[in-house]
Image (tube, rainbow, N blue to C red):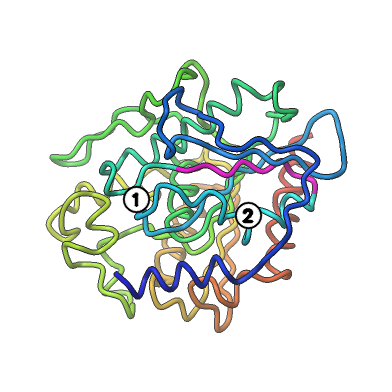
């Protein structure tokens, strides 16, 4: 897994934006416990307003890290902040802390926290977007497609997708728009799609997430797959993926896009020429595409 860690570090170091916030809150607990993996940071734009539309930005780590929330600002977070969005950067449990669905339970608790505390942090919760890269893209996409889902069973496997993390369980965890940067979807086809990294072994990121080799646990893979939950009520999606991604094959994003289209969900898929796992995608052109997408969704809802 050393190779994957180096790729993640290269993503984090691609940009070095200075954080330009009028206000910020660090290490806020969204679960009312003392765990660092249940904390988030809140950033408000320099331009002061009574309230701001908000985007949750989820870091990528192959689900191996529980404390990289600061790093996400160095990629997708700061462009959003500079464009006038409040940005929420959360931690979540790693696969070493707990198996799936702990990670999506945490992200959904973040959404509920925002809704419960919007006024306190000058957030306009009439628009909540979510974005993330790699494993953060997976969690963002899954948040978007699984709104309203509680307990679900596929074959012999059953999970509670919503979970009960934190004190705000009376609020919903649905979001208004998703930007997914090269997130995994169907773990079981990643190797057969053409990938430089092996995902089938029992120590792969995906196998570590679900608690067993993915080809021997296909029901759990289906429960972790955002495509499983796609329906017509899902929010608009923008999906970006490099055509030379060595870690997550772009077929995964194509499959999600096709499922969204089939269900009648507004979706756009951008296959970035010569794009890798971050390199080639994290640049002004694609940040602008993300920002324009979120703004267009806001305009369509007003």
Residue 188 position (above or below residue 243): above
Q: SS for tag 1?
A: loop
Residue at point 44%, 73% (across, down): 7
Relative side of 101 to 281, left or right: left
Which percent across, then down, holds residue 236? 60, 47
Residue at point 43%, 45% (across, down): 142
- Quadrant of residue 41 in the image? top right
Give the CA distance from mark 2 to mark 1.
26 Å
Residue at point 49%, 19% (across, down): 168
Q: SS for tag 2?
A: helix
Q: Name the residue under label 2.
A: 73
Residue count near mark 2 (Cα–Cα under 10 Å), binned few <14, some 14–19, many ≥20: many
The quadrant of the image that shows the C terminus is: top right
Of the pair 253 and 140, the residue shown nearer to us: 140
User: Overall secondary structure of the magenta stretch?
Assistant: strand
Which percent across, then down, holds residue 291? 73, 55
Of the pair 65 and 245, the residue shown nearer to us: 65
Relative side of 16 to 244, left or right: right
Q: Name the residue under label 1.
A: 225
Disc number for residue 107 = none
Q: Give the range drawn in magenta.
A: 84-91
So how many labels did they put on this image? 2
Relative side of 143 to 298, left or right: left
Residue at point 60%, 71% (across, down): 14
Q: Residue furthest bottom?
A: 274
The quadrant of the image that shows the N terminus is: bottom left
Which percent across, then down, holds residue 171? 52, 20
Residue 79 position (above or below residue 91): below
Q: Is residue 90 magenta?
A: yes
């Amino acid at each position: 897994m050393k190779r994957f860690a180096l790729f993640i570090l290269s993503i984090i170091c691609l940009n070095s934006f200075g954080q330009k916030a009028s206000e910020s809150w660090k290490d806020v607990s969204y679960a009312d416990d003392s765990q660092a993996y249940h904390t988030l940071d809140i950033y408000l734009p320099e331009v002061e307003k009574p309230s701001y539309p908000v985007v949750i930005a989820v870091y990528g780590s192959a689900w191996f890290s529980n404390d990289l929330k600061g790093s996400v600002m160095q990629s997708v977070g700061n462009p959003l902040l500079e464009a006038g969005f409040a940005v929420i950067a959360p931690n979540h449990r790693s696969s070493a802390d707990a198996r799936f669905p702990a990670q999506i339970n945490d992200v959904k608790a973040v959404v509920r926290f925002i809704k419960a505390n919007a006024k306190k942090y000058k957030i306009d919760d009439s628009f909540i977007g979510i974005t993330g890269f790699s494993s953060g893209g997976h969690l963002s996409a899954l948040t978007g497609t699984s709104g309203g889902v509680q307990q679900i069973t596929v074959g012999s496997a059953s999970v509670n997708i919503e979970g009960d993390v934190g004190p705000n369980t009376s609020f919903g965890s649905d979001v208004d728009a998703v930007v997914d940067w090269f997130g995994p979807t169907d773990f079981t086809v990643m190797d057969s799609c053409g990938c430089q990294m092996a995902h089938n072994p029992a120590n792969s990121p995906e196998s570590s997430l679900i608690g067993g080799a993915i080809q021997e646990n296909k029901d759990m893979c289906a429960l972790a797959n955002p495509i499983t939950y796609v329906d017509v009520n899902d929010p608009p999606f923008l999906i970006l993926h490099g055509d030379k991604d060595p870690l997550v094959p772009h077929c995964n994003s194509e499959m999600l896009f096709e499922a969204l289209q089939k269900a009648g969900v507004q979706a756009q898929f951008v296959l970035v020429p010569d794009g890798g796992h971050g390199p080639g995608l994290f640049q002004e052109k694609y940040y602008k595409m993300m920002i324009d997408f979120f703004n267009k969704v806001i305009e369509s809802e007003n």
